[in-house]
Image (cartoon, coloured by chain):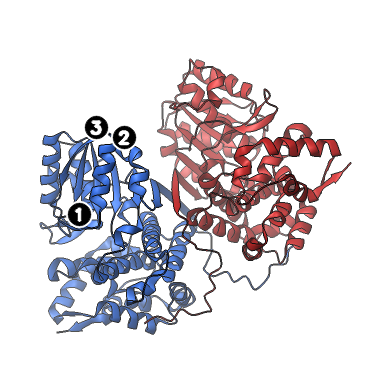
Chain colours: A red, B blue
Amino acid sequence: MRNVSDTVRRRHFAEMREMMKFYLPTKVFQEKDAVKRHSAQMAHFGKKALIVTGGSSSKKNGALQDVTDGLDLHHTAYVIFDKIKENPSVDSIMEAAEFGRKEGADFVIGVGGGSPLDAAKAIALMLQNRDSSKEVLYQKVELRYLPVVAVPTTCGTGSEVTPYAILTREDIQTKQSISHMIFPELALVDGKYIEKAPLSLLVNTAVDALGHMIESYFHSDATDYSRMLCQYAMEVWGMAADVLFGIDAKDGDYERLMFASSLAGMAIAQTGTSLPHGLSYYLTYHKGIPHGKAVGVFLAGYLSALPENYEPQVIMALRTLGFGSLEQFEGALKELLGIVELSGEETEEMIDEMMQNEKKLLAAPFEVTRKTFQEMCRMVAQK
Amino acid sequence: MRNVSDTVRRRHFAEMREMMKFYLPTKVFQEKDAVKRHSAQMAHFGKKALIVTGGSSSKKNGALQDVTDGLDLHHTAYVIFDKIKENPSVDSIMEAAEFGRKEGADFVIGVGGGSPLDAAKAIALMLQNRDSSKEVLYQKVELRYLPVVAVPTTCGTGSEVTPYAILTREDIQTKQSISHMIFPELALVDGKYIEKAPLSLLVNTAVDALGHMIESYFHSDATDYSRMLCQYAMEVWGMAADVLFGIDAKDGDYERLMFASSLAGMAIAQTGTSLPHGLSYYLTYHKGIPHGKAVGVFLAGYLSALPENYEPQVIMALRTLGFGSLEQFEGALKELLGIVELSGEETEEMIDEMMQNEKKLLAAPFEVTRKTFQEMCRMVAQK
């Protein structure tokens, strides 16, 4: 017979949700020199790669060089589109796709943070559907797309293992994921790319990953599959997070931050994000606030807005992350991010928009009112 | 600042392994009436399905009816091959493939325990490569295969989410996975199929899943990805395992056993199995002992054979499963499975075979000697 030892604490709720789904078709390698070691796989998705990246960081951190070396080694041709900006616009996608089309690219490699990775997916779609106009990005039609390889160089996006591609839509003045679910075929993850990153970049992206964990964990579509990913992500993040506070990295900490980011990406691939990401798009679009900070300022408020019956899970999640209380968590976020200033009018406008965003409202596992959003704004100062 | 609360015990080792891989392309739905709810997806892999199943259990538990109802609903034709026996032979694969070929099947649905599910994968390979002889099953050549849908009706195999297909090879007198990695496209998992299963079937299959967790967790290819899956599987298994000891099921226990089995399958999809599975093939092939029991009698011995530095992890794993000590674990396995009797000669022959099995020897995260296997035989009585 067994006697379940009560020293085994069932840390999180392992209720069986009635409907559970798991889907994550991307092949992931995380290791030192991942691009080099798996360059054969990367190079064999086609005859000519369109490399999609930003203006400078993938050159500085060595990722772009690793990718082109790997393609050269296997005699695969490539062209580079390095004009992806933060929060890429639909128009920049069309420009890159047009470039890739002229060059005859038959697969896409995204190198960088969330912006190039998300852009790579949208470009892969437009390249395959060369006669379509940009409207198809946001139409619910079934379309094919070229293979995508993702090489992340920040520890926040998780885009290398999600099907999402968030673009800036000037037409409706916000950021929004395209209507197509495009998982990369291959994700090559290497902690070395963030070793020399500025602290502000680490903070901004690791807080984005933190948002993914918290929003997915407390999500109306959470299942034991997604919670498993969140729990593990929180644990790994918690082991490495001292780095964000300026403490010297322990051996493996950069790899842990990358790993936590991928795990959190796998979690939101199952559930999507929730209210903090929804609110963040306003701050980024209208105020130019970087994505990680724009998410992070709402995280303590989101936990605080959860109904009382979530309290044990909130405490458990915070402890897994390495925080003793919600107050301590909020203090740490303030230390990392500072606060955001909005006028009363802007705050109202932001909340108005969210009250219309049915998808995000349904993502919260409780009834959302204007009061919910007011509570979430505790790191937003009235200006 | 954070202060990591020491009430947060880092339960398992979260070292960053140098090389980590995650790949699991199967789309999984676990829920009540999964086949019915997702029949459109199941039915649209082709024009005519070859349903591969055993002689009786999938008829009794309703799974076969659910599958044919789902195909009928979407006007997809099908034929049924219901002659898959336990530990299917290569010849039975060829017979089923020949049948499917004559009938013009263009995808395969496996319904049942590990045997029909594994068979379905091998049949999908032989159907696609219709002019090949059975030798290709065990040749390292790259071949395409038809889409496979898996509907498990036991809580042990995990085959619905693994790329493995274990067949009985009369030519070399053992069981062995084919040389091709064939993940099902779709896994439809429903706890209701085991609700009325005989206790002996639950025990035999849940102990197989237990073997997957333990062998994957203590495997030379284990990474934080595979350990995450094992830890969660152990926790879920531990919550439901009272059922195996004849205690009335709590709400959700059958679903938990199925879920634990799928999670454990996902883990071995990353690592493979280890010594207990290796030894089990001898017992099953030569002595006709059911797979779960043949694995289970070696599990306590495997944990005991691990080097001393694994002790904290062994204790943690056992506690997560609901056992206070290795002795208690061994006692529980004896209660569930009884013991196995072999002559001294048979034991030596079994160990001789394993000492030649390089792949399994390398799967153990320590140096394996004959003494290791002797220690693992503590539930094998000399006859």
Q: Relative to residue A99, is residue A364 depicted above or below?
A: below
Chain letter for mark 3:
B
Name the spot of residue B159 as percent of width and height, x first: 30, 54
Q: Chain of mark 1?
A: B
Q: Nearer the viewer, mark 2 or mark 1?
A: 1
Q: Which residue is mark 1?
A: B59
Pick out the residue farthest to the right.
A383
Q: Is label 2 in a helix, a strand or a loop?
A: loop
In the image, what residue occupies the spot 18% across and 72% down? Answer: B350
Q: Quadrant of residue B281?
A: bottom left
Q: Residues within 10 Å of mark 1 (few under 14, many from 20)?
A: some
Q: Is residue B143 visible?
A: no
Q: Give the secondary structure at mark 3.
A: loop
What amino acid type should be assigned to the residue bearing mark 3? Lys
Q: Residue at x 48, y 54 (%)?
A: A225
The residue carrying pointer 3 sits among few (fewer than 14), some (14 to 19) or many (20 or more) residues within 10 Å by Cα, namely some
Task: Measure the C-alpha gap from mark 2 to mark 3.
Answer: 7 Å
Coordinates of residue B219 in the picture (x, y in percent): 39, 64
**Do discs 1 and 3 share a chain?**
yes
Q: Amino acid at mark 1?
A: Lys
Using the numbered discs, state the Cα–Cα distance from disc 1 to disc 3 in whole angstroms. 23 Å
Residue occupied by mark 2: B44
- Looking at the picture, how far across and down is residue A266, in whole percent? 52, 48
Q: Quadrant of the N terminus of chain A?
A: bottom left
- From the viewer's perspective, is residue B93 above or below residue B191? above
Sequence-earlier tag: 1 or 3: 3
One can see residue B315 in this view: yes
Q: Which residue is mark 3?
A: B47
Point 46% across, 67% down: residue: B235
- Mark 2 in CB contact with mark 3 (< 8 angstroms): no
Residue A370 vs residue A252, the one in the foreground: A370
